[in-house]
Amino acid sequence: MTVHDPILAAAQRARAAIPDDTAMLRAAAELARDYALANPRIYWTDLLASALVGWSALAGAILVDNVAIALACGLVSMLALYRAASFIHELTHVRKGALPGFRLGWNLLVGLPLMIPSFMYEGVHTQHHARTRYGTADDPEYLPLALMKPWSLPLFILVAALAPIGLILRFGLLTPLSLLIPALRRKVVAEFSALSINPAYRRRAPEGDFARQWAAQEAGACVVALALVGSVFAFGWKPLLVYMAVHSAMTVINQLRTLVAHLWENEGEAMTVTAQYLDSVNVPPPGTLPALWAPVGLRYHALHHLLPSVPYHALGKAHARLMDTLDMDSPYRKGNYAGMMPLVGKIARSTMTRGA
C-alpha cells in the first residue's frame, strides 16, 4: 500500500526517525551479556514435554469416541504442539554449538510431522532483525497491516486457517514435481519455501551445508505429506481431518499472535532501533493468557528485538530488570501492552480510519 496523504506520510517518516534512546540501548547491551547463555536442560525438557503432550493428546482426539473428551484432547494437543512448534523461532537465534542436536531433534519431533521444517524459517527470520531491513519492502515478516484495507485482517487470518492444505500441496505435490521441472523448482524455492507474510519476498537458493540440510528436511516433509494423504486409504478420513483441524487451529493462534506482535505502522522507511522497538509489542505479566498464545518467550517480542540473542527462558528476568532500572519516562515502558484483544482492536480501528 502506498500512502498518498502527505500529512500521514510525514508522520510515518517522523516515527521511523525516532532518535535512539541511549539509556535503553545501553541497558539492553548489558543484559545481552548477562543473559546470553541458553540452558540445554530447559530447552530439551520443554520441547520433549510439549511434544509428548501434544502428540498424545492428538492420538486421544482421534481415538476417543466421546465428543467432549475428544474436543478437550484436541484443545490440549493444539496448545502443546503450538508451544513445541514455537521453538522454530529459537532455532534461528541460538548460538552455534549451544544446543547440540536440538535442531535435528526439533525437526524429527515437530517440524517434519507438522510440515514446517526449520529450513522454512532459518535464514528468513534473521532478515526481519536486520537493522536496515525491518519494516521495509525487504523484510519477509512485515506488512503495514494497520494501514491496509479493513478486509485485510480477516483475510490475514483466513490464509492461516488453510495452512495444512497449503503445506500438503507444497511438500506432497510441488516438491516431487519441482525435482522434474527446473523452472518450477526455482519458483518453489523463491516463493514457497519461507514462513513469511510479505508476498513480495523472494528467497535465494540455499548453498553449502544449509542446502544439504534443506534437501533432507524437504524430503522428510514430502514423506509426511504423502503419508497423510495415504492415511485416508488405510484409516479413513477421521485421523487426517482431526490432524488438520488441530494444525489449522494452531496456525490461526500463531497468526493472531503475529497480528499483535507489532503495531504494523511503518511503510517502507528504514527505522532506528528505538523506533523498531516502539513498533513492537510486549505483553508481560501479570497477564496469564499470553503464556498460552505467545509461548516460548514470544510475549516479550519487543524486548526480543532489543535482545535477539537472549534465550527465551531469560527474557522474563531481562524484562523485570529493565523495568526496575530504567526511568519512568523510558520508551521501554511504551512497548508494554495488556493483552491481545486491545491490540487487535487498535489495529482494526487503524485500518478503518487510515485504510478505508
Image (cartoon, helix red, strand yellow):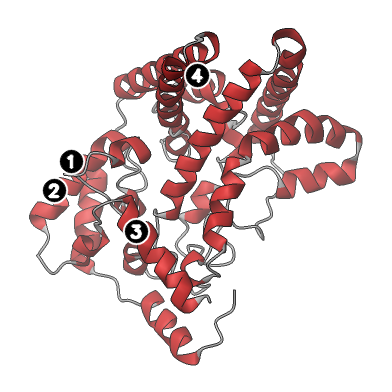
- Amino acid type, residue under disc 2 in the picture: Arg
Task: Verify CB contact (< 8 Å) between mark 1 and mark 4.
Answer: no
Label 2: element kind: helix
Task: Verify CB contact (< 8 Å) between mark 2 and mark 1.
Answer: yes
Badge 3: residue crowd in 10 Å (few <14, some 14–19, many ≥20):
some
Q: Is residue 266 visible?
A: no
Residue name at image x 52 percent, y 28 percent:
246
- Amino acid type, residue under disc 1 in the picture: Lys
Q: Earlier in the sequence, mark 3 or mark 1?
A: 1
Could you say which disc has been placed on residue 317 in the image? Answer: 1
Label 1: element kind: helix
Residue bearing mark 4:
105
Residue bearing mark 3:
343
Q: Earlier in the sequence, mark 4 or mark 3?
A: 4
**Percent coordinates x, y for residue 303 in the rendering:** 29, 52
Could you say which disc has been placed on residue 321 in the image? Answer: 2
Disc 4 to disc 3, C-alpha distance: 35 Å
